[in-house]
Amino acid sequence: MNRKYTLIAVLAAAMVVVGGLQINRADEFTEKDVQHWQDEYMSVVKVGRDLWTSPELGTNGVACAQCHPNAANTHPETYPKFQQQLGRVIALREMINWCIQQPLEGKPLALDDPRMVAMEAYVHWERRGVALAPGKH
Amino acid sequence: MSRGKVSRRDFLRGAGALAAAGTLPISMVELTFGADKDKESVSFAYISDSHIQHIEKSKFVRNWDRGLIRAVAEANLLQPKPDFVMFGGDLAQLGTKEELDHGAEMLAKLNGDLHCVMGEHDYYLDLGEYWSELFGPHYYSWNQKGVHFVVLNSILTYDEWTFDRWDSGVRRMAEMAGLDNPNGSPFMVGEKQRKWLANDLKGLDPKTPVVVFSHSPIQKIFKNWNFWTEDAEQVQALLKPFDAASVIYGHVHQIQYNQIDNISFNSVMATAWPWPYPRSYVQAESHMPKLTVPMNRADPFHERDATGWQWINVDSGRVSMSYSLSNNTDRVVAWNPKTGRPEDKVFQDKAGRIAPQTHY
């Protein structure tokens, strides 16, 4: 029993170190925590927006935002969906890669590349509030 | 309606792939709902928003080049020959000499007289100086077959933004080039040009049809992407005395049309790429004219889909647009004298609309 409590204490301490915030139990957080996590998210959204509007992912100077201002017409709420032109169900990030390869004439990103995550974060942020509609064409 | 024409055009597309296109005419058929056959009509081809984009040295973005090359080749097939050809602005992407020269070279292949409209992508690097060397004045007017045609430079903005805010023309151009860039600034015709227009229209018989060519819409649709002209109402007021006034505009890369009092509004397609309808950006308010039946949603897997050009007929002072759509069924938006507004010949009735016209 003692060893178990010791383990929990060690884990809790580790979480404090990782989180870098005030001492919390697992299910307790403050408004300040929420704000911090949102800020972390928004910093990645900003990275995504910067990539979306820059030519650096391609080779021909074209940026995603040229055809998709404010990431419009990307319909993140509909993915994964059957992409009829490819004949299979795909995730949004596969479509982002398709655009990087075709109109941007660039090399696809790894699906877990932080830049891909950032662009997905940006696309979703611009579409916030829209109800999920998986599979919708 | 225009079904016969459409199948002929579809045939032309197939034939075009066999390089036979150069010998096949595209017929300009009567488009209006109730055209007065005794009255002379004016017709012209209208190509717009080609966004020729320089990469480096002699390399340009192939996709946008192809759009303009195709539009020019098709416009040259029109029979009978149009009275003139318009280019609606945004020939270049970043207004450079290389881009404007390359675009001008492609436009030089057009048969007939060419009139050009200034777009923001042509303007904000050097305030239209090099564009002017190639294409002439920024705003002007002429009379042809009883119609008074006016070209406006509607993409100006506040002096402070243009002259004081940026440390270079390159930076200024880059800031205005981003459609959704919050550092941009709303388009306007401006006081100087409005005075010129008032003077230009003075003494003109109110029965004279007036057709205004602008890059921005001369109406307020969606500020976020500059589908917008800040002094739209003041320009509209100058057109109010005329029985029939029309505004034909580019910039929006999509089919739009509207009627405000006596003024008809029609947009033209881009040859480069389509833009989403404003309603698909849910974080900002937009005012798309209710009259507009949208173009089909673009299929990115067809490179030229939702791009195209148009030929336009002005008959009895009213505008009929025939959209020549590269990867899609052509559309006709024409003045309907019964309802007093432009209408799509096939899709105006809600019951006739198709699923791809639903944008979200």
Image: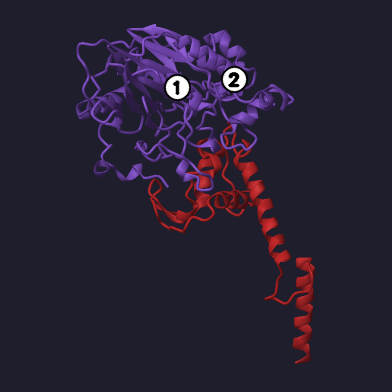
Chain colours: A red, B purple
| Residue A99 percent across, percent down from the top left | 51, 41
| Disc 1, SS | helix
Name the amino acid, label 2: Tyr
Q: Residues within 10 Å of mark 1 (few under 14, many from 20)?
A: many
Residue B272 shows up from this direction: yes
Mark 2 Cα-neighbour bin, 10 Å: few <14, some 14–19, many ≥20:
many
In the picture provided, is A84 more to the left or to the right than B165? left
Q: In the shown orientation, is residue B305 left or right of residue B116?
A: left
Q: Residue furthest bottom?
A: A1
Residue bearing mark 2: B123
Contact (Cβ within 8 Å) of mark 1 with mark 2: no
Which amino acid does the dot numbered 1 rest on? Leu
Residue A64, picture quadrant: top right
Checking the image for residue B68, the label placed there is: 1
Q: Position of residue B276 (x, y in %)?
A: 46, 39
- Check if mark 1 and mark 2 are on a common chain: yes
Q: Nearer the viewer, residue A48 or B314?
A: B314
The answer, for residue B107, to whether it is visible in the render is: no
> Which residue occupies 57% across, 13% down?
B131
Residue A11 screen position, x and y as percent? 75, 77
Q: Nearer the viewer, residue B345 or B304?
A: B345
Q: Quadrant of residue B9?
A: top left
Name which residue lies at 49% across and 33% down. Answer: B220
Dot 1: chain letter: B
The quadrant in which the N terminus of chain B is found is top left
Mark 2, chain letter?
A: B
Whole-percent x, y for residue B157 in the image: 61, 25
Q: Which quadrant of the figure has residue B305?
A: top left
> Disc 1 or 2, which lies upstream in sequence?
1
Decide: is A68 above or below B3.
below
